[in-house]
Amino acid sequence: MSKIARTAGKVLLGIVAAALSFFIVTFTIYFFNLDMKATAMLEPFFEKWYDKLERRQYI
Amino acid sequence: MKTVQKVVNPVRRAGEQSPAGIYDENLKVRKRREWRGVKDTFYDYTRWLYLVSVLAKFIAVPRNIKGFFRYRWMMSYLFVMHGMDKFTIGLRDEALRIAHTSFNFVIADVTQAIANCFRGDRRVGNDKKYSDACVITDENSMVTFMMGFDTNKVHTILREVPTMFASNIFHQFNVMHYLDIAQQYGIPGDVCPMPEAEAGISIEDDFCVLGSCAVQNNTTCDGSLMGNGIIAKRLEREYGIPTFQLATPLRHKEPDVLDYAAEEIKKAIAFVEEHTGVKWDWDIYFNAAKRVNDATRCRIAQMEINSTPYPQFFGAAFSLYNDTNYMGNSGRNADFVTIDHKLLELAEKGYQAKRMYAKEYRHRCIVWGVQPQYVIDMLYWMVQCWGVVPLTDMLSVINTDMIADEDTPENREQAYRDMAMLNMEMIMRNHTHGGYKVLLDDLWDLCEKMNADIVMMWEHMSCKALTGMHGMFEEQARERGIHIMWVSHDLCDPRVFTRQAIRDQVNSYMRTVMREEPLDPALEIIPDNEAY
Amino acid sequence: MRDLKYLKYFEDLLQQANNELVEQAKAEGKVCVAYTCENVPEPLLNLDRAVSVRLSAPNTGSLDIATYYMTNLLCEPSRALLERAIEGGFNFADCVITPDGCTMMNRAVENMELLKTMGKNNPNFFHEYMEIAFKNTENDVNLAVLQCTNHILNPLREKYGIDVSDAAIRKSVEDHNRLCRLVRELGEFRKEAKPRITGYEFHVFCLATYMCPKYLVEEKLAETIEEVRNREPDDKPWRARVLVVGSEVDDSGLIKLIEEQGAFVCCDRFCFGSYPGRTEIVLNDDEDALTQVCRHYITNCQCPRMMSMDKVYGRKKYVADLAKEYGADGIIYQQVKFCDPWAYERTLGSAMLQADYGYPVLSVDRPYNVSSSVGQMRTRVQAFVESIEIKTIQKGGRS
């Protein structure tokens, strides 16, 4: 097998591995709803932040 | 009483049989996502990825981050994916694809609307040139008066849509803060919470401030009309943004109001021209009119499919998409045409394959009244838990007439009447206003046409136009042998009726009046009252 | 002060919609045109043989049947009217003309129509619904002219042979103006430092002019003015002078309750009050009378439903001007519970009258019949009167 073919094979393998890792990580996040669980944990901090903001309440 | 033939689904659902397993009372979001079988789960996953990319693109713009930290309502958009889960509960095959196609398109549209708001907002992007080309309008505005303006030169900003309307779908509690503010300033708690919350946002100074001018209207109700005064005062007096009140007659079926309404449209157009410096273009208008007609044809076709034993496009996605397309778009954006046809194609495919949303369809139902924002997944729940299939909702029963779409001298005059007619026949108000016939008689006609045996009556307790006909609904339904199932709620205030309290009204009707057992008993009680 | 000769008589007239003057008018062959909203031009309902009678439901007790039809979420006036209609209290009406003004009142009348509560023995009986103007423009005047033609004049002519000519309208406006002058003249006494008429008394007389055929109350009203002119006012000073603004006040008990707390109701700016309802209509000979009447109603309209911002700001200025003219120390913004238009108007009005015009404001909601909530209302008014007194003392005024 030529050097070029070996390199191409490695690159391809790398792409497949990266794609697979991407899939595994993102699918895990997706399926176990980790995205929403994480944001739900942040929500109380944001609430406090918005409460602290000064606004000109006026009718 | 009228009965309909039961339709049994011969196909076992792919993946898990009940979505009940995804709920957890200790969590404010779902425990996990639904297993829909390999093919559909993978499809759902790719749509999730697509939404992640839309949001990532949005947040990559620094001014959007600034906006995020300025506006409380932006917190809701942390939960867009949670919204996606509500719109796809228990769905498979074409139904899942229809829900994603429509929902994801609307989300992309709303995301763009927020980005536009932040770009022009004096506190965030402060792009003055862009802001000067913006016209802000209400959440309940038909934007027909913008149909003839070049969208590259004038930007229509439905400021209240991302701020209040859409954000409440993702986060059921987010409006409560603004309701409290409004009530703290003296607005009573018995008015419709939607315009009340919008007034609260204005009082709290939590609207983006942009635009060369604003156009308000009275399209929905007394509350909406009155809330505008509070909002306009701040716009005009504090921010120097001139406002125009586009008066829209209530008795829209009477021919003697049309000229008045058309004249109002002319004035609104002249107002926009004056403040943006951009002229109305008839070529643009008639192209938009063609798209309006195309959307109407697609909607009629969807309703025809829904009249068969195998309805395909209904529930939250149907309603949200129709609202956005009919009212917020009004033919201005060509992308909707592609989506319209894609949705129709999916529905036709589903119909041919006799796809069903549940194990059985026991009842065919017309959903009338105004749905609550915070339990947007209700209709999907209803079909899966009880086999009651919602053929259409009231908000989706809108204009079916074609408007003039060829540019001729006569049609230019007709165009103002067409715009006026569409404006008057905006979603909801085309049934809640204009005399009792459009509220009562239209419903019974629809029951006949779509072969419905049950009406699920959303009784939005602050909607006086609806509750004012309560007794008549009961009496006339009885005369016609149609079951009427009352489901009370307070639109966007979950403190009055929780989600389960809303579902329990259906549960109790189905058990006590219909003497039936649920198709999926695990769904009868869902622990999502505290979830976003 | 000595009791007014006709006070009891007018109080009695307000006890039911089908009062003795309405019966008298019917016996005289008049056509009774029932209506529910101040936005309908009154002179057009009083053409020729027609007499207008504003529907009301005094002494309302149970609202059970109306609540079944309309739920308990609609305002009490709309339910009270429906209940009274179902009971047969409006059978004297020969037609009902209703503007699609506020949703609830419109729904009340639609229920009356669907339930066929009126017109059982009258083949000419009709219901008409009108679109009413939203803004103060010529487009709105054109709309009003068309609506009045199609929904008032044409049906009255076709069904009852009423003369709806320009001359008839001018004659009706003349009669209307005569009545307006009487009501306003009576109201002028409220400007005095020691008023010779109470706000309650004035309210009774003013309200009767809407609920009775006008030609039958005029004489007694004129006599009352003379009586008041010669009346000795009380020496005891009022604790405060207040202007009452808001939804219709069909229950004079509300005005009485306010005055019992020492607050003299020096002026009224509510639906079916004297402002703007009893403003004279000035006609010229250059334009047809119908158009001028419609323009008058649109220009003078103070209904919160008018949505253009000139009207929104104008309504507050109108209140402030009245408060100044009548020497009010404070303003009471009141609304019937569940009334959407006045709920928002009360909120914005009370904020603007305080911030922009410097008036103390009491902002309050109430039931249709104040008797069901006397204690709460009394407490609110007492506190308001005290706060005005404290402010007056702080400013170095009377103690």
Image (tube, rainbow, N blue to C red):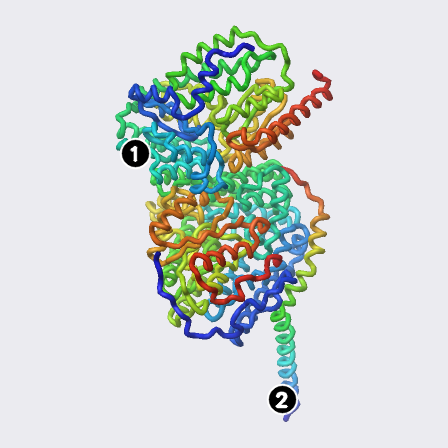
Q: Chain of mark 1?
A: C
Q: Quadrant of residue B388?
A: bottom left
Q: Residues within 10 Å of mark 2 (few under 14, many from 20)?
A: few
The quadrant in which the C terminus of chain B is found is: bottom right
Q: What residue sits right under mark 2 in the picture?
A: A5
Residue C120 disc label: 1
Q: Secondary structure at mark 2?
A: helix
Q: Secondary structure at mark 1?
A: loop
Which label sits in the foreground, 1 or 2?
1
Q: Quadrant of residue B86?
A: bottom right
Q: Give residue C165's position: percent from left, percent from top.
A: 30, 23
Tag 1: amino acid: Lys
Position of C48 relative to C194 (above/below): below
Tag 2: amino acid: Ala
Residue appearing at x 36%, y 33% in the figure: C147
The residue nearer to you, when weighing C9 against C246, is: C9
Position of B23 relative to C289 (above/below): below
Q: Determine the residue located farthest toward the top in the rendered image.
A: C230
Q: Are marks 1 and 2 on the same chain?
A: no
Q: Give residue A24's position: percent from left, percent from top.
A: 63, 76
Give the distance between the C-alpha atoms of the residues marked 1 and 2, in whole angstroms. 98 Å
Q: Residues within 10 Å of mark 1 (few under 14, many from 20)?
A: few
Residue B270 visible (yes or no): no
The quadrant in which the N terminus of chain B is found is: bottom left
Residue appearing at x 59%, y 40% in the figure: B235
The residue nearer to you, when weighing C203 against B161, is: C203
